[in-house]
Amino acid sequence: MMSNPITNIKRMEIPEETTKERNIDEVSRAVSENKDAILKGIDLLANLNKSGSLDTVNALVKHKEDALENVMGELNKPQYSGTLENMSKLFLFIGDLKVDEIQYFADRLNSGMEVASTFEGSDKTSYMDLLKALKDPEINRSVTMLLQFLRGMGRD
């Protein structure tokens, strides 16, 4: 004997009041777990509102198509074509840079500038002073590094 196929499916209905209570509990938990972020967001909105930027951002979002059309219209003017072309080349150039090595040299450059900015001497440096200075390991290391840099720059 075979059973009859199920043709009428009755969905379990959850009362609207229960759904509302669950939603309120879920929102309450999320607010509690993200209290700091919410307060920072409110502070950000308050500062944007105080400066008048919130109205600008709001208008920009509401009229994004018009704003984008105006920006693109401006960028298509001949005076900006060189800038846009250079920006694309700049992004490609930035991709080729070895940031860790640049950071190392920037740190060294900052150290040198810090020492140089505190120097108050007014005496002239003689050739003999330069030769004596090369005996200082820090100066010798810097001069050697500079020479290697120049050698690398001049290589074909």
Image (spheres, grey):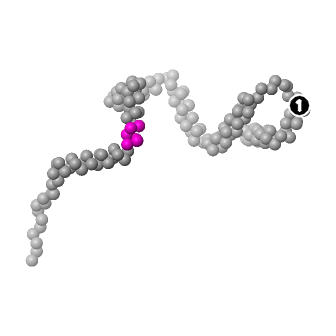
> Pointer 1: what residue?
127
- The image quadrant where one finds the C terminus is top right
The quadrant where residue 52 appears: top left
Residue 47: give x, y in percent of width and height.
Answer: 41, 29
Q: Which residues are magenta?
A: 35-40
Q: Establish if 68 lies above or below 37.
A: above
Is residue 36 highlighted in magenta? yes
Residue 135: give x, y in percent of width and height.
Answer: 86, 40
* Residue in the image at 67% along x and 42% along y: 104
Q: Secondary structure at mark 1?
A: helix
* Residue in the image at 24% along x and 50% along y: 22
Q: Establish if 129 lies above or below 135.
A: above
On screen, residue 18 versus residue 27, left or right, reads left
Q: Main secondary structure of the magenta part?
A: helix
Q: Tell me if I can see residue 122 in this picture.
A: yes
Could you classify mark 1 by the number of other residues whose Cα lies within 10 Å: few (under 14), some (14-19), or many (20 or more)? few
Residue 35: give x, y in percent of width and height.
Answer: 37, 42
